[in-house]
Image (spheres, rainbow, N blue to C red):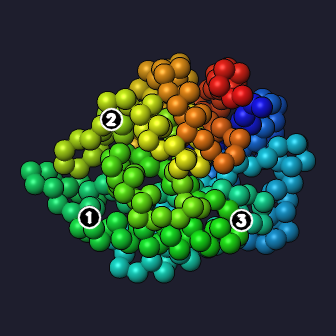
Amino acid sequence: MSKRISIGTWAFLFNQERKIPFEEVVQGLHDLKFDGLELGGFDIHPNPDNTPTSEERAKVREMWESRGMGCSGLAADLWGENLITAPSNASYINTFQKNLQFCNDLGIDVIRVDTTEDPWVLGAVPGETRPEQVTTQVDYDTALRRVAETWRFCAQAAADAGVRVVWEFEPGFAFNKPSDIFRVLDAVQHDNFMVMFDTCHADNIAVEGARQPGEKETLPGGIRELAERLAGKIGRIHLIDSDGTLNEHKTSTHPPFGEGRLDFDDFMPALVSAGCPDDWWTIDLCFWPNAWDATAKCKAAVDTLNEKYGG
């Protein structure tokens, strides 16, 4: 059985000449024969704050369901929270629970999180200068404990609500070495907490060692090895090319398929074998200029991957 294909709606908000309204996005994706979308719950697109009532939320859900489409997940706006440096996790948890209720109201069963803070919040590294924006640092063990305790609580709350929590590891945020990923998973230790495997981020983490404080840590087998080692822990797959660079937002450049360097035939069998609880593959064109112009090309590329590996 082939995979269902979605695309993150944030692609049509960031770095665009104009932000594309949500209903226009939904109709355009329907025209391109997408099976669904992954909702970026922020800015002008539907989110807990600009869509506060159950009636409004029902209308949003109807936008995709009336077109025979689904919603593969919610990218929650948690970036105003300090997951690592804040001594109390009360604010983070409140914001998470607000987004969890939003998921329930829209029938969304996956919620995305990240560590929200710069890699260099994890204590001083000898011989390195921390970025100017990093004003507070926390020792590694304290940071790991805070993240694990908070996400364990969130994972249980989400499990009770029928929603899976997926952590998108990436070079732009703390805990971005391969060993960090395994440490966080081990520390959270909850069946409802898994990772989001973005092929572009995986390239920058496992091959480039991008924005890693201290000694760089990569894997000999690159993306393929990372996928193999995360078998049973992957809760969402994002597919996109990579050229091994970072963008102005200090995270992975997400070039359209064919404009990067990834050898999908090398790692897709391992990524598929690693398993995933659902049948969605999501295209991620985050921060790519004129993303709409690249969407059809990306859909065609993923359709080809689906034919080869989706069954």
- Residue 140 marker: 1
Question: As shown in the figure, which amino acid type bears the numbered disc 3?
Answer: Gly
Near-viewer residue (172 or 279): 279
Q: Whole-Å distance between the Cαs marked 1 and 3?
A: 32 Å
Which structural element holds mark 2? Answer: loop
Q: Position of residue 146 (x, y in %)?
A: 38, 72
The extreme right residue here reads 66
In this figure, which residue is indicated by the disc labeled 3?
162
Of the numbered discs 3 and 2, the one sitting upstream in the chain is 3
Task: Give the number of callouts.
Answer: 3
In this figure, which residue is indicated by the disc labeled 2?
219
In the rendered structure, the answer to whether residue 3 lies left or right of residue 76 reads: right
Question: As shown in the figure, which amino acid type bears the numbered disc 1?
Answer: Tyr
Residue 41 visible in the picture: no
Near-viewer residue (287 or 156): 156
Q: Whole-Å distance between the Cαs marked 2 and 1?
A: 22 Å
From the viewer's perspective, is residue 215 above or below residue 303? Answer: below
Check disc 1: other Cα within 10 Å, few if <14, some if 14-19, many if 20+.
some
Of the numbered discs 1 and 3, the one sitting upstream in the chain is 1
Q: Position of residue 144 (x, y in %)?
A: 34, 66
